[in-house]
Image (tube, grey):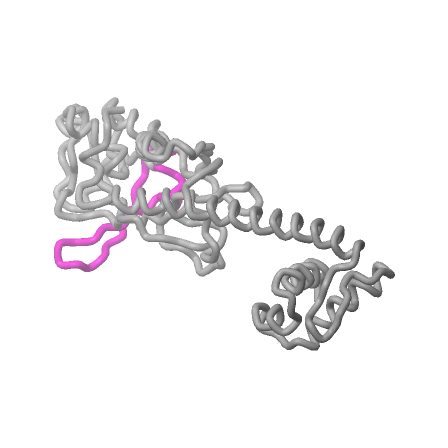
Amino acid sequence: MDRLLAMQMFVRVVETGSFSKAAREFATTQPTVTKQVAAIEARLQVRLLNRNTRGVSLTESGAFYYEKCKSIAREVEEADNVVQLRQSQAHGLLRIGTSVAFGRRVVVPLALDFMARHPQVQLDLSFDDRYTDLVAQGIDVALRMGKLADSSLGARFLGMNPWTLVASPKYLKKQGTPRRPADLSGHTALIYSIVQGDEVWRFVQPKGNSLSVPVSGRLRSNNLSAVLAAARGGLGIAALPRYVAQASLVSGHVVEVLQDHALPEQEIHAVFPSPKLVAAKVQAFVAFMQGQFGPQWWETLPKA
């Protein structure tokens, strides 16, 4: 049994005046408490308590030791209370990781709103399109697209991220508008290399069956903003997340192509290092984000 628990038992023996009463408080037996107090006396080589038929009384050394033990017990209780209070309130530095485009376009305005609602939280935003090891990088919560691999991470589903095909009116006027996925073989594709690295675009047809179409083009990039800029410039047809394309669709710089043949959607998840004992600041942020991705959520984004 640890020294701290033995000291706590000693304090309660003194305050209750009884080994048996102290034992009941600690859900143990009287001999166990007696043995722990005796072990303290043996270690210190000093008598702390006088025992008689009427109960117990402190020796001079025991009185000094009791005051010190009581102070230590109070500090331990205060430490427990502070930690529990911090766990129950959103407080402290929250490190968030996400991809570059999603972070800049979606997470930043939402994070600023979250900060306004939780003034005791400070944010550290990290943008990286590469896979991030949450534990190694010290990330409290990451926002990820696509299906999650089985792991020990905690995770919460936030919503869906739809994709769409877009092109500028200028390009379509010059090259014609594709009417079916197979027509893309005669068009210039603008390829986002992280998702479409194999140069195959996959569609969900109106009846629900899937279709894969090989594409080719002069531009490949791992940056969604670059792909959007090329589409706006009339250089080809691009497959983009709706949140990336939305402002350009509204402004008319690009229009949707093959609307009856949807591209697969991606799941959006918040992931965190462990599903157990999740910090209040992480719980608060995840709960906040779970309310942000309803139907057509991309239409409510602030202007870029």
**Is 207 displayed left or right of 109 in the figure?**
left
Which residue: 71% across, 49% down? 68
Residue farthest toward the right in the current orientation of the protein: 45
Which residue: 26% across, 28% down? 231
Q: Is residue 108 above or below residue 49?
A: above
Which residue: 42% across, 49% down? 271
The residue lying toward the viewer, choosing from 225 and 47, is 47
The residue lying toward the viewer, choosing from 17 and 128, is 17
Q: Is residue 207 magenta?
A: yes
Residues in magenta?
192-221
* Residue 159 in view (yes/no): yes
**Is 289 displayed left or right of 128 in the figure?**
left
Point out the image quarter for the C terminus.
top left
Which residue: 15% across, 28% down? 250
Q: Does the magenta stretch include residue 150?
A: no
Q: Where is residue 124 in the image (x, y as percent from the top left)?
A: 47, 32
Q: How many marks?
A: 0
